[in-house]
Image (tube, rainbow, N blue to C red):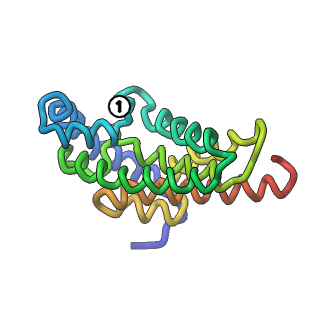
Amino acid sequence: MAFRLFRSPTARRAHLAARAPGRARISRVLRDGPPLHRLAIAVATLGGAGFLPHGGGLGAIAGALGAWALESRPGVSLLALAMVTGVGLLAARVTIEVAGVDDPGECIVDEVAGSWLACLASGLQGPWKVLPLVLFLLLDSVKPWPANVLDDHPGAFGAMADDLAAGAWAALIARILGLLGVG
């Protein structure tokens, strides 16, 4: 396997096609499954927002809102991000198991964690604080290295880690732009 700087369009299409069959399984368990599975799926889908069009974008906005709500308390925000990531790993594991596919599109807790990291670590304030969110959405789509490699990792780790890597890239780029006088 050759080194890739970004995810190829072919890999993106294949990834999206592989995720599609899990939606009905997730819905069925969310409606009629065991209580702990229902809770895990509710967390992973952010209360069902993952079923909506552009659910990943909604998850990213939720993560940014979490970071912005706690921006005056970075230590608390970091702890909250760690909790979202930890609980998200567990919820994603159950959702992936139920769906029968890696990284089902309805599972958006990974976008919450990735955008939260981007906004928390960027340090931008005022109107420029939306820049890390926008960068995260772009970078989560194109998957720069190592996000593209982590995206290929099966299971909850791969589902969460690729978004955290995209969030780290977004924070780094936003911070550099901030140092250059943008924010």
Question: How dense is the environment of label 1, judged by Cα within 10 Å: few (below 14), some, or many (20 and up)?
Answer: few
Q: Quadrant of residue 78?
A: bottom right
Give the left or right position of residue 78, taking residue 155 as reference. right
Q: Quadrant of residue 137?
A: top right
Place of residue 95 in the rendered image (x, y in percent of width and height, measured from the top left): 25, 45
Place of residue 179 in the rendered image (x, y in percent of width and height, measured from the top left): 83, 58
Taking depth in this image into account, of 103 and 129 the one nearest to the observer is: 129
For the point 34% across and 63% down, which residue is it? 153
Place of residue 109 in the rendered image (x, y in percent of width and height, measured from the top left): 40, 44
Give the left or right position of residue 124, taking residue 18 as reference. right
SS class, disc 1: loop
For the point 68% across and 39% down, which residue is it? 130
Quadrant in which the N terminus appears: bottom left
Three-letter code for the amino acid on which mark 1 is drawn: Gly
Place of residue 62 in the rendered image (x, y in percent of width and height, measured from the top left): 51, 36
Position above or below: 20 against 172: above
Residue where numbered disc 1 is placed: 47
For the point 61% across and 39% down, which residue is it? 69
Q: Quadrant of residue 53?
A: top left
Q: Residue furthest right?
A: 181
Give the mark count: 1
For the point 38% across and 26% down, which residue is it? 52
Taking depth in this image into account, of 112 and 54 the one nearest to the observer is: 112
